[in-house]
Image (spheres, helix red, strand yellow):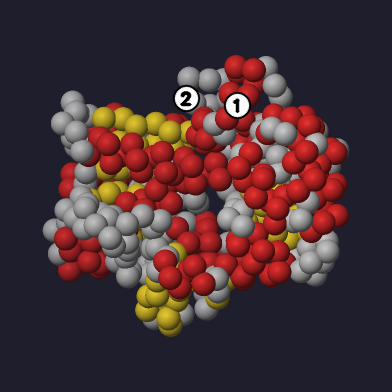
Amino acid sequence: MLLRGIKILDLSRVLAGPFATMYLSELGADVIKVEPPEGDETRRYTPIVEGVSTYFYSINRGKRSISIDLKRREGRDILYRLVKKCDVIIHNYRDETAKRLGVDYEAIAEVNPNIIYTVIRGYDINTSMKDYPAYDIVIQGLSGIMMTTGREGEEPTRVGFALADIFAGLYTASTILAVLNNAIDKPVKIEVNLLDSLIYSMSYLIYSYLIAGVEPGRYGSAHPSIVPYQAFMCRDGKWIIVAAANNRLFNRLCKALDMEWLLKDERFSSNDKRVKNRDALIPLLKKRFLERNLEEWLEILRDYGVPCAPVNKVSDIVKYRYMVESGLFGELSDPRLGKVRYVKPPIRINGSRPYTDKYPPDHSEDSYDILKELGYGEEDIKSLIESGVVK
């Protein structure tokens, strides 16, 4: 594995940090998840099966878990032993909390000046908002993305998953990899925040305004710059995605729909004209798609080389033929849940997907082994457990 021998100390909670460290674990890193005595709060997020949170399961595979009370001196002593052995530490505490628990940058760098210190925040540390709460929906609202999602006139629409956390997690992991791969002066402090990550990821939506002064609109499934490029309902009530992203594909679409007369209409002769006249074109296409069922249209459009797809539910995609062929879903054995399907990383290295076959750990599952690795004797471990320093 690419990161074999790299040790990562994960003090992060909830989503962005755990997602980043899970990805690094799937690349081969030894990730030690340090949890408070009560455990990561996502262990209690529903749905819960056999005492296991599906939310926690999705972002903590491949890790080891130890529970340490960092409010106790003995707990910080354990942490600092871990710090000396690790290459990376990551957390998402506020600065004052990190200082109180002894995991602030100065304290950690003193213990291990070569460690890559990583902190994920809601907002940039140099702003007046640095201490504001940063839940996903708050970040989505601030970023502007909720006013580019859904349809005009409807209430603001949240993207269905916490994409600010996921983007921040990916930027965190990629930056850690970049630092690990380069001879850079130590110590290194990486700072990532959710709001900047989401705004950066909005790409052309932001530049539409920065360069052209155009406020991005809300087009439902449609695209602000390409027409037709959206979902259409079919006769059986199912939806089909159509992406006629250029004149060549629009020509094919018109032939597939037996609507070649549209090609003679000057209003639709180029993409920029179709964008300007979408209100005239889209109703015509909507009416036509209601004349056949989804599977019929998929077969016809694919025969003509028009990019198209069904609009799947999650329950559809896990059974989709592509998933069997791609090997994106793996299976691991979990003593609590039996055989569990999971999603492997979306990459291949030399033709193979990296993966971990280790299920997300129970709370404190690896405490004993980790303490033994740190040099603690049996009596010391027994004392730490009985005193509540370690769970």
Q: Nearer the viewer, residue 277 or 315?
A: 277
Query: Which quadrant of the view contains residue 142?
Result: top right
Q: Which residue is mark 2?
A: 125
Question: On the rendered image, what quadrant is the C terminus found in?
Answer: bottom left
Number of numbered tags placed on the structure image: 2
Residue 230 in the image: x percent, y percent?
A: 70, 48
Residue that appears at 43% across and 70% down: 325
Badge 2 amino acid = Ile
Residue that appears at 52% across and 56% down: 41
Sequence order check, earlier mark of 1 and 2: 2
Residue 247 in the image: x percent, y percent?
A: 63, 39
For the residue labelled by badge 2, is the local secondary structure a helix, a strand or a loop?
A: loop
Residue 173 in the image: x percent, y percent?
A: 36, 43
Residue 12 visible from this viewpoint: no
Left or right: 232, with 199 as reference point: right
Q: Is residue 283 above or below residue 205?
A: below
Query: Which quadrant of the view contains residue 370?
Result: bottom left
Q: Are marks 1 and 2 in contact (CB under 8 Å)?
A: no
Q: How far apart are the two marked residues, 1 and 2, measured between alpha carbons?
A: 22 Å
Which numbered disc covers residue 206? 1
Left or right: 132, with 227 as reference point: left
